[in-house]
Amino acid sequence: MSLGLLRWPHPALSRPAAPVDAVTEETRAIWDRMIEVMEAMPGVGLAAPQLGIGQALAVVDASDERGRAIRLANPRIVAASDETSDYPESSPNLPGVHAVVTRPKEVRVAYLDETGAAREREFDGLWATSVQHQIDHLAGKLYVDRLSRTRRQMLLRKSQKHA
């Protein structure tokens, strides 16, 4: 299966995603496709811009047993813990590299769910890391943008050689 993932430095990866006005059948079809790609990678999250879809849509599934993906439209962090955690992060858009990123250990996220209802949900641990990683993608940022300039440049060069 061709996953359809964009490769850095594709400009769509640096553009903020457009807000979703309403959750439609098309929105749900995009989420279904995103979950297929996330499972095929395999990964714990995916944002629509990674597939070249400029909408503020993300999916996250950090469960051990899988099949528990949460679909999010227009996710935004409304609260974050002072306590942080470090996780190694990577992206299929930057193959062959990864880095440990420090993020808040817990976040509360507001979003529209698969029915279009406004929700808020607490995420912690790997779930929190993944949802923050996806929200970064929706803002046109990659995890390497959270690193020092030197480390970022090194990883980008290494990923380009991985082609």
Image (cartoon, helix red, strand yellow):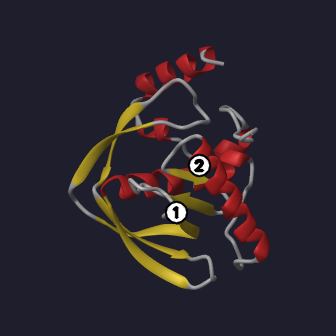
Kind of residue at disc 2: Met
Q: Nearer the viewer, residue 23 or 41?
A: 41
Residue placed under numbered mark 1 in the picture:
69
Q: Position of residue 77 (x, y in %)?
A: 43, 67
**In this picture, residue 50 sits left or right of residue 141:** right
Which residue of the protein is positioned furthest toward the top in this rendering? 161
Q: Which mark is residue 49?
A: none
Please report whichever mark, 1 or 2, sits nearer to the chain's N-terminal start. 2
Q: Nearer the viewer, residue 136 or 41?
A: 41
Q: Is residue 24 visible?
A: yes
Q: Position of residue 79 (x, y in %)?
A: 34, 70
Which residue of the protein is positioned furthest toward the left in this rendering? 83
Which residue of the protein is positioned furthest toward the right in this rendering? 26
- Whether 50 is drawn above or below 120: the answer is above
Name the residue: 68% across, 62% down: 32
Distance from disc 1 to disc 2, alpha carbons, whole Å, reads: 10 Å
Q: In the rendered image, which quarter contains the N terminus?
A: top right
10 Å neighbourhood of mark 2: few (<14), some, or many (≥20)?
Answer: many
Name the image quarter holding residue 83. bottom left
Q: Which mark is residue 38?
A: 2
Name the residue: 47% across, 57% down: 61
Q: Position of residue 98 (x, y in %)?
A: 44, 30
Q: Position of residue 78 (x, y in %)?
A: 40, 72
Name the image quarter holding residue 4. top right
Name the residue: 76% across, 38% down: 2
Judged from the image, the secondary structure of the residue bearing numbered disc 2 is helix
Q: Is residue 15 visible?
A: no
Q: In the rendered image, which quarter contains the C terminus?
A: top right
Marks 2 and 1: in contact by CB < 8 Å?
yes
Kind of residue at disc 1: Ala
Judged from the image, the secondary structure of the residue bearing numbered disc 1 is loop
10 Å neighbourhood of mark 1: few (<14), some, or many (≥20)?
Answer: some
